[in-house]
Structure formats: structure tokens, C-alpha cells
Amino acid sequence: MSIKQLSYLFSLSVIVAGCAANMNVNDKVIAVVGNRQITYGEFQRQYAQNALPTNDTSNTIAKKEKFLDLLVNYDLKLLDARKANLRNDPAISSEMKSYEGQLAVAYILEHEITESMVQKIYDRRKDEVRAQQVFIQIRPDSTYPHGDTLKAYDEALNVIKDLKAGAPVDSLAHIYKGGDTYYITAGNYLQYVGGEEFENMLYSLKPGEVGSVPIRTAYGYLVLKLTDRRPRYESIRASHILIRTVGNTPADTLKAYEKAMAVLDSAKAGVDFAKLAMDNSADTVSAKRGGDLGYFSRGMMVRPFDEAAFNLKVGELAGPVRTQFGYHIIKVTDIKQVPPFDQEKNRLRSTYLNGGYKLDLEKFEDQLKSRYTYKVNDKLADAICAKFDPSKPFSETDFDSLLSGTEMNATLFTFDNDSATVDTVISELKSSETLSRLPATSENFVKAVNEAGNEMVLTHYALAKAPTYPEFDSLIKKYEDGILIYQIEQNRVWSRIVATDSVLKPYFQKDPAKFMWPRRVDLSMIKVGSMALADSLHGLLVRGADFDTLASRFCTGKDLREKAGHWGLFADSTNSLVIVAFGMKVGEFSGPVRFNGEFSIIKVNGFVPPQPKTFEEARAEVSSDYQEYESKKLQNEWLEGLRKEFGVKIDEKTFHELVAKE
């Protein structure tokens, strides 16, 4: 049993998950298993959580009876597992201890980092911001090949000082680099180096304010001055009329502008916008729809058009707006506001986890290390690293021969009231696919120590903090119950099923008709790498060439060439070529068909009617069928014994009355 099986355990354990029954809603007892009562309120919640979505409302009573039986069986198995004292089994105790640490870490990171940040991003996205920026590049020089970072940082501080003193942004942007960010919103820059600090700074400023510190990016520093902040629209819907400039002279431009003004005046005078678009717009696609462009979000249109459209209210007109396409008359017809948090949270959570989460996690780990006075024995680490061969990866390093027992058991780092030995860190290093492949250098060993330290500090904190959340204990219990039921089923059912040939052959011989080959087709194939060659070979076949001879000479696969193209027997739904073959006649060959990246011509050699399989042919199917049969039999015997041992009482009258009232 391993953690990898927890998804299976979860599907089992959710059956009994959930809050205590709301006595004010429905406290009627519908079943008693051992000494545990199942109320109708509990049953309703479990049914709602676990029943598959369906539009079929027929025979609800039968479905709910079946689900109640499932709940009863679950409780019976759990009683048996606790009677067998499985919770104190060393393997299960170890599994639960390991899992509790993992779940606690995941739970704390979700509640203390992710949830709050997703809410923060959503709240920010209600507004859009615009800024002017100055970019100070970190330039490499002879002294600092990767760039004089300090020099660039000092220059950025001077830019901030100048801006706050009233210097124009444009002149400083010209000296360095920079420009207008245009309108942006939170969450779009988290994947970039410095992206989270960039967004934090933008949303901390008021229009006209200059950021007090430079933002470090992958290539230099950004200085920001906020120029606007306004409520954000999710998207708008607009119609437009495009008047294209014909010719390149000022007179041509003036002519287009005057026509656009005339159209705008007509629209303002109340002439139907859709008719004006159909009669005048050079955008023939949207003109057919009365100028309608559909919904679009900020930044999807060219900037002059975008800026004009997003400044309008529903029903308002703008224009003429000049772009590289000509002059536009714009009318906003609808505005979509920012959706509610519940509709956005999953998408924003994904955005955050793929972007700023990593940086926030590192900050959180650093804070915990500082709080717990985390300290590495650098002298010991250096001594350990000196014994490694940096030309080999860690996976090929024989730690046991290089390090003594005393060195393995020496404390490598400490924090709070806990510590880790060299052996602990090396075990973590070996289990990491990423770290184990790295060269055994001092730098990479320090990385391994740091990752082990982060994991242990997080687990230390999470195990102490997670139980303070009321729902955490119930979550742990849910998984514990799942593990116990999984193990008791292994003990009572699956470990007792032996699928050897001595068992399977008699089972097969009782009903061999269950294991039949369906109708099959015998095929040959010519498979080549190009369509041109396939066409050429098909032409030869049409003119009477021998299929087997061509297959022996031209098939790309050696196996097919050696078998003169004979492919084998196939059932009717094996693949697309076989499906084609079942529509052909014996002796007929197909045209070239693209299949698995190559080009194939198939020939039908014959059809084989349904026939029984031999035991050897059916063995896998027999084994599966036997295990399913035997497991059901053992399950039923086991549950019947548990019902007699612990007792089950179901108040069918009350249950049916309550279901009927829904």
C-alpha cells in the first residue's frame, strides 16, 4: 500500500465524509449499523456528494436504496477494520504519519498562500491600471561579465528621485528605455521574473505617484509612474463603420475624414447604425452584421480603436478614430462586467500556481527558516562535498563508501527543536529524480540541503498549524478510514484470490462459450513512407501486379517484408484500417490511406467467423473474469458475516416515506 493509492481511497472515503447532520433539517434515523446511527440528513448529503450527475429521475427510490446499502456496507467494513486493530499496524501507522505531513503541508499552503493570493488577484482585477515606465538595463562590462547590477540599481534610484522632483517621464525614458504600459490587469505578469513585484507596485500606487523602489526584472530595473486607474470591464461589444482612405495624398485623407464625419453625424441624428454600416463600411465582414464586432477584451484591438471603445458607455458613439486601416465610427452595444469570484477562482488559481506561487512559496519558506532559527553546519557540508567526484551525478555516487557512519549520523542543519542528519539529506537527494541526476558538486549539494530544509521546516510548521483548522481533522479521519477499508478488503477478499492455471483452467472449461473470438478479418498490407510511392504501387496493383511481391520489396517494416505483407487477424473495431476492411470483399485491395504517419494499402485475404478461444488465447480474459466472480462471492460472504456479527437495522418505512416526500 502506498500514497499513490490515495485517489482510490479518497473515492471510498468520501462516502462517509461531511459535516454532522443538521438536526434542525432531518434527524430521523433510517439505519443503525452496530451502534452507529445513520440519519436521513446524513444520507441526503452523502447521496448529493457521491451520486453521478444525471437527468434521469426515474426510479429514485431504487437508486437511493442501493446507495443506502453502500453506506451500510462501508460502515460494516470500517467496524471490521477497527476490530482487527489495523490502525496500529506499523505499515499503516507509517503510511498515515507520512501522509498526514504531506496533507498538512498542502492544506496550509492552500489556505495561507494560494487562497488569499487568488482572492487578492481577483480583487485587483476589478480595476485596470496604466503606467509610464523607465527601464535601466544591466549592462555587462569587463569587471562584471553578467552586468554591473549595483550601478544599474543606483541609476534607477536616481531616476526615481528625478521623477519625484518633477522630471518628465518621457525625457528619462528617452535617455534609457521605457514607455507606456497601456492598460493592464493583475495576474497577467506573474510568470515573468519580477512580475509579482511589478503588479504589487502598480496596484499600490495612486495616479501620479512614482514607485519608491525599482523593480528587478531578468535584464534590469523598472521604475514606474502610475498614470491611470479605472474600473475594468471583462469585455465589451461594439459595432463599427470603417471608412478606408483610398490614395496617399492629404486630399485623399481629407476626403475619407469628411465622409467619416458625415456618417458620424447621421448616426448622431438617429439614422440606424446597422444600416449605415451595411451601406458605408469598408469592413465587408462586419458590415453584413450591421457593423457588429462581437465581444472583445482590452488589448485585442489596435490601440487607438481600443482606447476609444473602452471609454464609451453602452449606446455612445466615438469617431472618427484613425488607425492604420482608416477612420472608424464606433458604437458600444454591451458591456460585460467582471464575473463573480466563484466563476473566476479556478482559472485565477491556475494562473497563480503557474506564476507567482513559486516566489511566494520561497518567501514563506524563508520566513519560517528565520522564525525557527534555521542553521546549516557549513563546515560539515564543505567536508562532505570535498569527498564527491563532481564529474559524476549524485545517482552514481557511492555515499556509503565515501562517508563514515559518524559522518552519516552527523547533524547537518537544525531548526526550532528539530534537526536533520547527513543521511536524511542524502536519502531525500536520492529520491529526487531532478537532484539525483545533477553533478555531485558543492553547489548542487547545497541545493539538496536547501530543498530538504524547506520541506522539513514546512512540514514542522504545517503539522502544528493545520490541526487548528476545524475541517483538517475530519479530512485526516476521512483518509484514515479509506486506508483502513482498503487494507481490510485486501485482507478479507483480494489476498484470498489465487489466479493460477490450476484454478483458471477448470473455470474456463465450465463455460468456454463465454470466451469467443468475434468475427475477424485476415489482412495483408503494403506500408510505405510517402504518398507518391503509395500511389505508384496502387497503380501497379490495378494493372495486375502481385500484392505479396510488392509488399516483400517495398514495405518499410522488416517484419512485414519478411511476411510478404501479411498483417494478421483483426476484430472489426481494432483501428480505422480494419473498419475499412470490413466493408471490402475477399481479394479486394484499398487505395492508399494515411495511417500512423505512413501510407498503407490493405488487402482482404478472408473473413473468419466467430469461434471459441483456446485457454491460452483467453487466459488474460479468463483471469479477469474469474477474479471479478470470486471477489463478488467473497465480498458477499464477508458482508453477510459482518451483518450477523455487528447487526444492521434499516427502517425501510421511514426511509421510503422521506424519499417519497422529496
Image: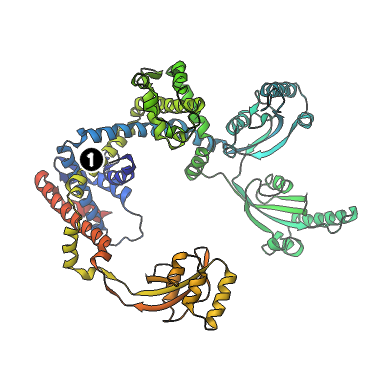
What residue is drawn where x is 56% and y is 44%?
338
Q: Is residue 60 above or below residue 307?
A: below
Say left or right for 237 vs 59.
right
Q: Is residue 365 above or below residue 9?
A: above
What residue is drawn where x is 47% and y is 22%?
386
Question: Which of the 4 image quadrants contains residue 125?
Answer: top right
Question: Which of the 4 image quadrants contains residue 130?
Answer: top right
Mark 1 lies on residue: 484
Say left or right for 628 vs 11.
left
Q: Is residue 132 visible?
A: yes
How far from the left and from the top, in percent, is residue 517?
A: 30, 71
Q: Residue furthest left?
A: 644
Q: Is residue 461 visible?
A: no
Say left or right for 45 vs 440.
left
How far from the left and from the top, in percent, is residue 333?
A: 64, 53
**Is the N terminus in the top left, top right, bottom left or bottom right quadrant?**
top left
Of the pair 446 and 605, the residue shown nearer to us: 605
Graded by Cα atoms within 10 Å as few (under 14), some (14 to 19) or many (20 or more), the crowding at tag 1 reads: many
How far from the left and from the top, in percent, is residue 349?
A: 49, 40
What residue is drawn where x is 25% and y is 64%?
616
Question: Which of the 4 image quadrants contains residue 470?
Answer: top left
| Amino acid found under the numbered disc labelled 1 | Leu
**Is the C terminus in the top left, top right, bottom left or bottom right quadrant?**
bottom left
Q: Residue furthest bottom?
A: 544
How far from the left and from the top, in percent, is residue 476?
A: 30, 35
